[in-house]
Image (cartoon, rainbow, N blue to C red):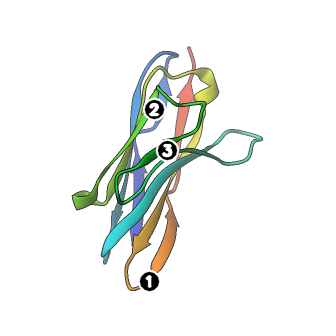
Amino acid sequence: VQVVESGGGLVQPGGSLRLSCAASGSIFSVNSMGWYRQAPGKVREFVAGTTSGGSTSYADSVKGRFTVSRDNAKNTVYLQMNSLKPEDTAVYYCNLLVVTATLTNYWGQGTQVTVSS
């Protein structure tokens, strides 16, 4: 199984970015899908997640600004980030619970998001 992230970059405060994370390989299905982030000198923290049933959850710091969604046919999870703030600057990682012959937790390689004027 391969997990590939894309979509990070540099954006001004108030701007938007969309992150994508796709799993490929011999996959039966993907259960939970989520996004985490890690800023320099800080621990990795939960940002947003979605279950196989479509329920979503968000960190308080991003509620109303970020939206997580998924495309089960493509084994892909997205994170739409609006009204970005400098404190959103971090490396963003996706996390997928993948069903193959077993149930395995996978992390993406990380993508840098920098919010700066």
Q: Nearer the viewer, mark 2 or mark 3?
A: 3
Residue 63 appears in the picture as rendered: yes
Residue 89 horizontal side relative to residue 52, left or right: right
Residue 34 horizontal side relative to residue 45, left or right: left
Secondary structure beneath label 1:
loop
Residue 25 appears in the picture as rendered: no
Mark 1: which amino acid?
Thr
Pointer 1: what residue?
102
Kindly indicate whether the residue at mark 3 contacts the one at mark 2 (C-beta within 8 angstroms): no
Gap between marks 1 and 2, in whole Å? Answer: 31 Å
Pointer 2: what residue?
66
Say whether disc 1 or disc 2 marks the residue closer to the N-terminus.
2
* 37 versus 115 height, above or below: below
Looking at the picture, tell me which residue is in the foreground, 109 or 69: 69
Kindly indicate whether the residue at mark 2 contacts the one at mark 1 (C-beta within 8 angstroms): no
Residue at position x 64%, y 26% in the image? 87
Looking at the picture, tell me which residue is in the foreground, 112 or 104: 104
Residue at position x 32%, y 55% in the image? 76
Say whether disc 3 or disc 1 marks the residue closer to the N-terminus.
3
Gap between marks 3 and 1, in whole Å? Answer: 25 Å
Secondary structure beneath label 3:
strand
Residue 13 horizontal side relative to residue 24, left or right: right
Mark 3: which amino acid?
Ser
Q: Nearer the viewer, mark 3 or mark 1?
A: 3
Q: Position of residue 65 (x, y in %)?
A: 47, 26
Pointer 3: what residue?
57
Q: Position of residue 85 (x, y in %)?
A: 57, 21
Q: Quadrant of residue 82?
A: top left
Q: Residue furthest bottom?
A: 101
